[in-house]
Amino acid sequence: MPAPTPEQDRAADLVFGARRELADRYVAHLAGSGIVRGLIGPREVPRLWDRHVLNCAVVEELIPESARVADVGSGAGLPGLTLAIARPDLRVDLIEPLERRVQWLTEVIEDLGLEHVRVHRDRAENLADVVDVDVVTSRAVSALTTLVPWSVPLLHGEGRMLAIKGRSAAEEIAKAEKVIRRAGGGNAVVLTAGRELLPEPTTVVAIDVGSVGGRIGPGGSGR
């Protein structure tokens, strides 16, 4: 398992708190069976802590206490499993259509004892009648023009979409304005997470749907 740098070690302690040991075991899964079974590329092993796990886990600061969360295109559990480890108060639904990824996620969830996590083997656009959440997350799944119609229906008229993006986040919002409005989304903004923990904070596109404040309130850690 790749060892974190002293800076990453401190950040992991702050993000995961008393559940840091679970985060270590998750990274071991990624670096082991995750590589063998093709969920993570071998070249990503040295960057698992900073580029993947911590980059995703800091998004927890944008999620309110006791929220219901759906992670679209969960893949190797990024960000869904990192959020579930950091925040035991959340109820997390991982949405992933590929069987081999679903099997791996199921094995990791069972090994870590994450009873507040469920896995759905399906596409997000097929699950609006099954999944009803407060927050929808995603990372490296698709452009907003495609991602918004997949994600917003899972909020059932009220909630928040949080999509981890790169430097072109503002451009994606501009291109997706009509799609966002058509789907029922309201204000779309670029936020950062982990500013005080990471040398490169995580860029997140946040799209509010309905009266978000009345249903899920402000973001904050539930640890």
Image (tube, rainbow, N blue to C red):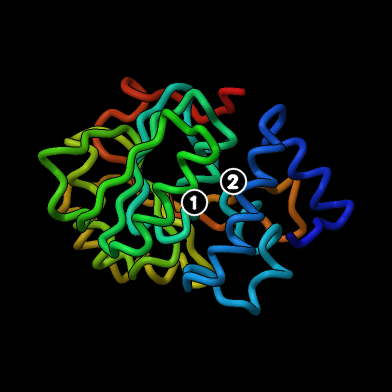
Instruction: Specify few, some or many for label 1: CA neighbours under 10 Å numbering under 14, 14-19, or 20 or more.
Output: many
Q: Which numbered circle lies on residue 57? A: 2
Percent across and percent down for residue 88 are 52, 27
Which secondary structure, mark 1? loop
Q: Which residue is drawn at 22% across and 54% down?
A: 124
Q: Which numbered circle lies on residue 189? A: none
Q: Mark 1 points at which residue?
A: 79
Percent across and percent down for residue 139 are 44, 60
Percent across and percent down for residue 29 are 59, 55
Percent across and percent down for residue 80 are 45, 47
Q: Distance between the residues labelled 2 and 1?
A: 7 Å
Q: Is residue 51 toward the left or the right of residue 197 in the image?
A: left
Quarter of the rendering occupied by the C terminus: top right
Q: Which amino acid does label 2 sit on?
A: Ala
Q: Which amino acid does label 1 sit on?
A: Pro
Q: Is residue 114 toward the left or the right of residue 155 in the image?
A: right
Q: Which of 161 and 118 is in front in this view?
A: 118
Q: Nearer the viewer, residue 69 or 107?
A: 107
Q: Which residue is drawn at 15% across and 38% down?
A: 130
Q: Nearer the viewer, residue 88 or 211?
A: 88
Farthest right residue?
Answer: 6
Q: Is residue 82 toward the left or the right of residue 126 in the image?
A: right
Which secondary structure, mark 2? helix
Q: Which of marks 2 and 1 is nearer the N terminus?
A: 2
Q: Is there CB contact under 8 Å for labels 2 and 1?
A: yes
Q: Which residue is drawn at 21% across and 42% down?
A: 154
